[in-house]
Amino acid sequence: MVRQTMLRFIRLFIGLFVCSLSIAFMINANLGLSPWDVLHQGIANKMGITIGKATIGLGFIVVVLDAILGENVGWGTVFNMMFIGTFLDLILFSNIVPISNNLIGGILMLCMGMILMAFGMILYIGSGLGSGPRDGMMVAFQKRTNKSVKLIRCVMELGALTIGYLLGGSAGIGTVITAIGLGYFIQIIFKLFGFKTENVVHRFILDDINYIRLYITKDTDKSIK
């Protein structure tokens, strides 16, 4: 039980790092930020903070919206909110991802970023510890509307882009490519690996609280006897 839980958390953190790496690829493609990063940059510029910190702050707001939409919060949700932005700042600061200076290289980096995002999502959502804030919203809308992942993701990306642009975020051809293409890449990779978000059984923070409560109650009952 302990070993299995540890493996799930390891899978979770690897997935979160891969997602952060994918965002770094899309930023350093230098063809315009992805829709959510346009929003993050707009918030960061308005508030005078890093993109990573803006990612964390917006993640908290989206978690609240997920709860309203009926999505339970797991440790994966909380750690996604905290560590995606932290890993992203570290990756960008360390310069481990090169910056493209031409169109072809930029497009290749965008495609790599979108592929990595899909793999990162399979890893951390598949850990069964709860979806990340934005992916939790995607899953919630999918359950409520029964529409395809690509349609829901495209609508979310375009919504984030619109708000981010109004806040002063930078947009370009790469923004359009990721706004339209990310949902397709995610759906293709999901199908290729037979991964279905609706089939993942998540363990939520509330489950752990109830487990601890029952454990304490049992110990109390034993001591009374």
Image (tube, rainbow, N blue to C red):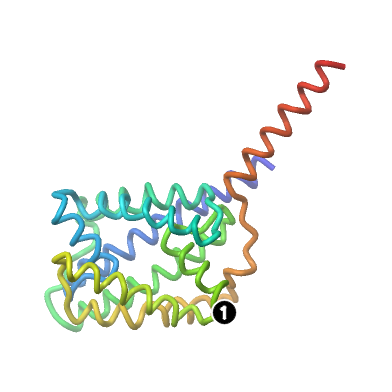
User: Height in image: 184 above or below 92?
Assistant: below
Give the quarter of the image for residue 70: bottom right
| Nearer to us in this view, 21 or 78 | 78
Residue 55: x %, y % from top left: 30, 55
Residue 56: x %, y % from top left: 32, 50
Identify which residue is drawn at 31% across, 48% down: 86
Identify which residue is drawn at 20% across, 78% down: 105
Q: Is residue 25 left or right of residue 71?
A: left
Identify which residue is drawn at 33% across, 71% down: 113
Looking at the image, which residue sits at the far right?
225
- Disc tally is 1
Q: Is residue 214 left or right of residue 180?
A: right
Q: Is residue 163 left or right of residue 193?
A: left
Residue 94: x %, y % from top left: 21, 51
User: Height in image: 6 above or below 179?
Assistant: above
Q: Check the picture and name the quadrant holding the C terminus.
A: top right
Identify which residue is drawn at 17% across, 49% down: 49
Q: Check the picture and name the quadrant holding the N terminus.
A: top right
Give the quarter of the image for residue 169: bottom left
Label 1 neighbourhood size at 10 Å, few (<14), some (14-19), many (20+)?
Answer: few
| Nearer to us in this view, 211 or 33 | 211
User: Height in image: 89 above or below 201?
Assistant: above
User: Height in image: 157 above or below 67?
Assistant: below
**Residue identified by numbered label 1:** 146
